[in-house]
Image (tube, helix red, strand yellow):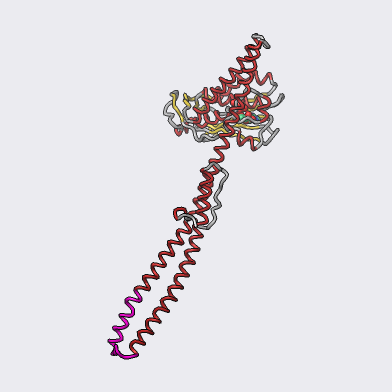
Amino acid sequence: MTRRGSWRIGTRLFVAQVIVLLAISISAGLVASAIGPRLFHEHLIEAGEKETSPQFSHIEAAFESANIISLSIGLVIALAAALMITWYLARRFSTPLTDLTDTATRLSSGDLSARATAAGGVPEFALLATSLNDMAERLENTEATRRRLLSNLAHEMRTPVATLNAYLEGVSDGVLTWDDDTRHVLERQAERLTRLARDLDDVSRAEEGRVSLDLSVHSLQTLIESSVSQFGPQFESKSVQLSVQVSAGLVRVDPQRFAQILANLLNNALRHTPRGGIVSITADRSADDISVAVSDNGEGMTSEELGQAFERFYRGSTARAEDKNGSGIGLTISRALAEAHGGTLTATSGGRGCGATFTLSLPSPHTTSSLRGSESLGTRHPHRTHGSTR
Ligand SMILES: Nc1ncnc2c1ncn2[C@@H]1O[C@H](COP(=O)(O)OP(=O)(O)OP(=O)(O)O)[C@@H](O)[C@H]1O
Ligand SMILES: [Mg+2]
């Protein structure tokens, strides 16, 4: 047997119950043998039996043996029944508890795939197992996101750092000459690293709710047209048509942040739409919100890509292959900015080759009183955003 301190709960319950039953049996035996015969003796005398008569001692002996036999049989039956019930209860508690303990131990030692089976049929244990499994699931997802984030970050840094190193070595070894081309390459890689650092700062600010919004009411049409006019030449040079249909009126936003969201959506659409394709911006309003949708008929996204597109540093395989400048956090920042405005940013796609639609929904100016901290127009407010594991 294991040391007493390491006995399992089932064994402890069982042993404790055995001790209680033995104590009950012993005290019942002692009480019965100390009080019963004396009372019987007095009753016999009161009934007129002579203490000296041979029947007297015979009757007393018969009473004692009947007493012992009936008490023993009763105690043995009670003991057996109690032990069986204790054994059953101990097993019923011990199996799920052991399973829960094992699962918690595996989780705490880093095995995040451990799950409790919630067997045993005790509702409280089943609830505990479900909560433990939910927590394990969340931990596993967070760990997977953290790993992916670190590996993506390493991937994003590797190329510019390797290029910088190669060029600097080439120049110092005399293999490369220090001319405008070399300087241009080095500047581009340094810019890329600077942009990565700025994006990282932006994304952590957005996710920690440290975004400053300079809110004011604007015409949605003017905001969209000013973004569109900046993108016109890029769309023209790639021969992608850009159509705009705006029917909504006013919107209360930080114009720079709004332009940042739209610029990322237009950039993405242009990047993922082949020559001859169409990108359209449509804006509509309902009673409570204003929605701006940027749709393209380009590459589209699989459901797996849709699920990950808003995660930090996520870039689809085609994005990695085609464009070396993106960091994969444009959508993360855009969604955080949309949420800071009290709105949402969502994506849909019919699948690979079927185009994609990104929809920015913002509360109407008359409902933006629900927007956290926006008491007046044109003032700067820090806003918290929801969640951090997108
Ligand atoms: N319109 C689109 N069509 C198809 N895929 C898209 C589209 N928009 C985004 N994606 C996918 O979502 C990924 C994430 O987009 P996101 O804007 O966050 O990063 P990025 O554009 O790659 O880089 P960054 O915006 O930081 O320059 C893209 O790499 C691409 O795979
Ligand atoms: Mg982008």
Q: Nearer the viewer, residue 305 or 60?
A: 60
The answer to whether residue 147 is magenta is no
Q: Is residue 282 visible?
A: no
Q: How many numbered markers are drawn?
A: 0
Q: Is residue 34 visible?
A: yes
Residue 317, given in percent of the width and then of the height, sits at 67, 30
Seen in the picture, residue 190 relative to 296 is either above or below; the reply is: above
Residue 354, given in percent of the width and then of the height, sits at 69, 33
Residue 99, given in percent of the width and then of the height, sits at 53, 52
Relative side of 356 to 134, left or right? right
Residue 367, given in percent of the width and then of the height, sits at 47, 33
Extreme residue toward the right, this view: 276
Relative side of 202 to 165, left or right? left
Q: Nearer the viewer, residue 53 or 22?
A: 53
Seen in the picture, residue 27 relative to 353 is either above or below; the reply is: below
Q: Which residues are magenta?
A: 31-54
Measuring 66% from the left and 34% from the top, which residue is drawn there? 301
Q: Nearer the viewer, residue 254 or 221?
A: 254
Q: Quadrant of the C terminus?
A: top right
Q: Quadrant of ligand 1?
A: top right
**Is the magenta region chiefly helix, strand or loop?**
helix
Q: Nearer the viewer, residue 175 or 292?
A: 175
The answer to whether residue 45 is magenta is yes
Looking at the rendering, which quadrant does residue 110 occupy?
Answer: top right
